[in-house]
Image (cartoon, rainbow, N blue to C red):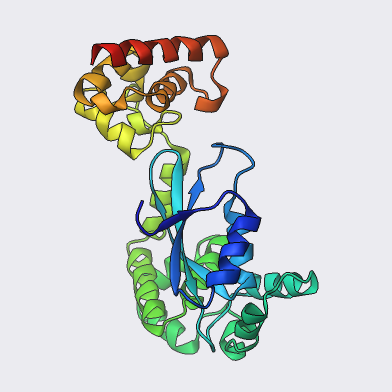
Amino acid sequence: MANVKSFHSKAQLRQWFVKNHNKQNDIWIQLNKKGVEPGSLNQAEVVETLICFGWSFAAIKSIDQWSYKMRAMRRKPNGVWGLNMINAAKKLKKAGLMHKAGWQIFLSRNKKRSEEKLSEFTPKQIKLFKSNKVAWKFFNSQTPSYKRYMTWWVVAAVREETKQQRLEELIRDSGQQRKLARVEAALLKAKKVYPPGQTPVEEGKNIGQVAGAELRSVGIDTLERLQSMGWEEAFHKVCEMYPHRANVNMVTSLIGAVENVHRLKIDAGMKSEGLALVREMKRGL
């Protein structure tokens, strides 16, 4: 995996930063998804290490159903630090964990922009919002928690053009007398409510986008179809189309999806059956 580094522990990650924090400007760090290999390096430990060296994370992307990657970048002097990052840096300094270079970057932050109260629209933003009477009325009819969050979402943006874009998006959706479209979409996704028999196969335990696409290509497009078919038949279908998938990871993912358990918690007897099927498939390919 080009440009993506994997670390086994927080200590190993810190050692890399000691040597490279001032030599590179960014790095992609691979992490396991929740429930995969408990005890391995986690996101909170990465973020803490980044703060110690004056770095921040800029993006998160999925790799497969078991792992994802975080993009870490060096902070620039006079940059903006969020309140949570400021508090974390002070605690790490007190604990003796802040690296000298990271502390210098922290001290050079733009204090005015970093620590100003980000909880209210500016008079100019309010004027623009009020120019759409329907949007303003709808927004003010919402719950206090929604209004607080959406106000923060707008004013906490670092770039002025981003603030403007977010405010325009909020006004547009409020003008249609609806909550922010992306918030509604996230809520629907979190609820994961689907019509009977139409649950996307990707919603199954252990089935990510890659395995989901492979299952769909062989006609298994819903979780219900996968479960009624059984993991053995599904495994045969996938391996006929994708011989390289005749492996332990694939068979345990299918077993877990059918039985609705994490692949690492599959019954020992069933896992043994899966391994036997893998060996059988490999002999026949």
> What x and y, as percent, mark residue 20?
52, 71
Task: Examine the image and state in which quarter residue 148 appears.
Answer: bottom right
> What x and y, as percent, mark residue 190?
47, 43
In the rendered view, tell whether residue 143 sits above or below residue 219: below
Q: Residue at x 50, y 86 (%)?
A: 122
> What x and y, as percent, mark residue 83?
64, 74
> What x and y, as percent, mark residue 264?
54, 27
Q: Residue furthest front?
A: 19
Using the rendered image of the protein, determine whether residue 230 is visible from the camera's viewpoint. no
Using the rendered image of the protein, determine whether residue 216 is visible from the camera's viewpoint. yes
Q: Residue at x 24, y 24 (%)?
A: 243
Task: Examine the image and state in which quarter residue 86 appears.
Answer: bottom right
Q: Residue at x 44, y 83 (%)?
A: 125
Task: Examine the image and state in which quarter residue 177 appears.
Answer: bottom left
- 141 or 73, which lies in front? 73
- 116 or 245, which lies in front? 245
- 195 or 18, which lies in front? 18
User: Number of labelled discs?
Assistant: 0
Q: Residue at x 45, y 9 (%)?
A: 273
Looking at the rendered image, the quarter that the C terminus falls into is: top left
In the rendered view, tell whether residue 188 sits above or below residue 7: above
